[in-house]
Image (cartoon, coloured by chain):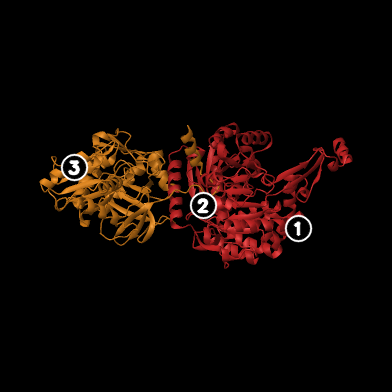
Amino acid sequence: MSVPCTTRRIAYHDPFVDELYEDIGRLVGGESADAGEVESRLRLLARTNSAATAAYWAWYEDGVGIPDSAYKTSPPYLFPDREPVRTFRTSDTTGSGTGRVAYSPRGMDLMDLSIVANAERHIMRGLAEPAVIRLVPPEAAAPGMVMAHGMEVIARRFGDPRLSGSVLDGSGVDRLALRRLLGRAVVEERPVVLIGATSVFVNLCAALREEGESWELPPGSRLVDAGGHKRSRQVTVDETRSMAAEVFGIRPGGHRNLFGMTELASQLYDGEDTAVGPAGERPRASEAFVRARVRSPEDLTLVDRGPGLLEVVDLCVLDRPCAVLTGDLALAGPAGAAVVGRVSRERRRGCSLALDEVAAERGAHV
Amino acid sequence: MSEYGVSWLPRWLGPGTLERTAVRGGYVGWRPGAGEWRAVGEGLRAAHESLRALPVAEIVGAFDETCSRWADRDFVHRARARRDIVAATGFSPEAVDRSLDVELANYRSGTLYRVLRRELGDPGVLEGFRDDVELGGRTLAVGPRVTMVVCSGNVPGLPALSLVRALLVKSAVLLKVAGGEPTFTAHFLRSLAEVNPVLADAVVVTYWPGDDRDALRDAMEQADAVIAYGGDEACAAVRAYLKPHQRYVEHGHKVSVGVLTRAYVRRVGLGEVARRVAVDVSTFNQHACIAPQAYLVEGGGPSPGIDDPGPEDVAEAIAAAMAAYAADCPLGSLPAAEAAGLQMRRAGLAWTAANSPGGAFRRSPGLDWTVTVVPDLLSLPGAGNRTVGVVPVGGVKDVPRALRPIAARLQNVGLGALGDEFGALASEIARLGACRISEPGEMARPSVVWRHDGMPCLSLLVRWCDIEMHREARPDMSTTFDRRTV
């Protein structure tokens, strides 16, 4: 293995990065590789190429994930000698603005590799060329939206192109397009994979229910929803499954929830199908290349049980520090960590106001 | 808690006409049901008649005696209050004790007479008509019959301030405690009742959920004056039900900061300055609006070091002082969700500092304190729980510019400056919007004499009646002559 001179920045085409890139690929592909050792090399890369990351680890906690808010203020990118080929925008789920996440060509490769590997394991098992119907905009229409990219990658790789497509445009779900795609899949008895944000799916179901429209999709059809618990409106897993069954005829076993963030290259899928969180949240499955863990809110130690801060270690993140403190609350347990809500930001108390809230007021009145 | 939970019911008000209500944190209280508010209002107006007969000296004396008892940390009501406040807020027992020391030291006779004289001139105007030389007649101050108080729960002991202000002007009080800390007020009133039952009989302490607008409206209908603490939303809800005849004193959202000039740090010494900042930040666990969230620190010295410390040296010293303060008086125990919020805030601060030239970050191993050096005030997210930002400014002249973004909400400034710099900065800071300036180390101990949030809070409650141009009410002109010739 190449050992870089750690006092100098590691170049994008340094043999150290070449090997790391190859090893991560092997890890994702299921070949035997030492995930701990890959993680160490990723941390060395981040520490060497980002003085800010090194200072952050020295001051706050060694090796801890960088906070999601970092991408709104000073987004890290480890290869100044290689222009990013793609920049995604984070969503403004907390009302504190959007962030930027930059990818090098290798970073994009690893992300796509991870998306495909995860989809193969968690969505597509037992399905051959299903109709992949995306409740997200086409990638070309939303180039800054990582979910649009990821779901299009899945559709391209696994879906039957004749039966697949995006049904979300600027004005919402295109019902005609949805009916057309669902109709074809039913006629051809091809299982459907409905994939998109939880909120879009829930709103669609509510509208279809109201209008009395429902489908009995072919056996094996699946619902893959992303998010669901970041917004103020919380939907339980049971409610989601009940809607999927009632409106689309998708059986409970066909439901998967995925946790993804723009800041991450990989997604975390539901693991064991056991309700853990208050809304029925399932523990997340760990993979060799991505895992969720929980840190104590008291002292940041890693905990095996109980509530804490969600930290995701994603070994497919090459361009940035590989661990992220996501800003989510998680429950640690023997089957893994379940994501149970957002960490509420400490702000106003009685007559006391936060300085950044004054800034927000000013912004609102400009 | 007692049989009435967080409520205080005067002797004339049995629980029979009230409803038991759940209060956040597993507490209970008693509140009038729909249609019962008028009867409570009538009872308070009757209690006001008894209160009006009390001389001011007796009211002041009652508070003095009550608070002298509370000055003993073993006083039974104080010990019970401490136990309950610790459970309600998670503050450490010592943090609660220090909060109560600060709050209740204010209500001793000397201080209360100072505030009465400052705001009303002659406290006797609350007893009857008094000569008013400038008027050429006589004047009388009439307090509200009933004052409604909406409390916030961020500062242990704070409800006493509104009770004192209202009762000093002989107003009965209908007080709604806050869910965040609902327990102190009933303990305080039990102790007041032991000293002067007439005063305690003029107060009803109750609770309803913040979103119960009907209860708010019904309660407000019983009041001639309203004092409200809280955020913009809570205050807006109160304002929505105000009637033209009602006096209104609002203590809404505010922010506070400190300033340290190089000359001040050199004169006072780095260690002592840091100790003062730690007191400002740590008192009330920084939950009060008067607590500084940041200190602007003048940098730019030619050779920063022990003799001329720069912002990073100041931050380092503050971190040491915060640790020393926490060793004697820990933060307490935060609920898991709040602790998680603090950790995410710390992570964001550490990242901001790591990406800022001259940035720095220090924290306690647990959650007790956090100190960071950040480039500007608006880079500081969140508030409270002993987290302070050190913001370098190039020179004294840059201080007003640095404060301008928060001017609209600026309240309390700990001004560490000397001589001409002090005078110039104090004037500029006052014009920007601040309503209190103190020395660092005194930010968390405003006196009741202070015009709280820039308002004469006692005199705002009273209605004046002047007699002028009447032969029966001419003041003693010899006094007039004397005053004019002095």
Q: Could you tell me the amino acid type at mark 3?
A: Arg
Residue found 22% across the figure and 40% down from its top: A175
Residue on which the image places disc 2: B214
Disc 1 marks a residue whose amino acid type is Glu
Q: In terms of image quadrants, where is residue B54?
A: bottom right
Q: Residue at x 49, y 52 (%)?
A: B211
Q: Which residue is mark 3?
A: A179
Asked if the residues shown at circle 1 and circle 3 are in contact, with their CB atoms under 8 angstroms apart, the answer is no
Q: Secondary structure at mark 2?
A: helix
What residue is shown with label 1? B58
Relative to B478, is B199 on the left or the right? left
Q: Nearer the viewer, mark 1 or mark 2?
A: 2
Residue A58 seen: yes
Q: Is residue A29 above or below residue B207?
A: above
Marks 1 and 3, how far apart at CA: 82 Å
Residue B411 place in picture, x, y as percent: 60, 42
In this orientation, which residue lies closer to the viewer: A198 or A288? Answer: A198
Q: Nearer the viewer, residue A260 or B35?
A: B35
* Circle 2 residues within 10 Å: few <14, some 14–19, many ≥20: few
How far separated are the C-alphas under marks 3 and 2? 48 Å
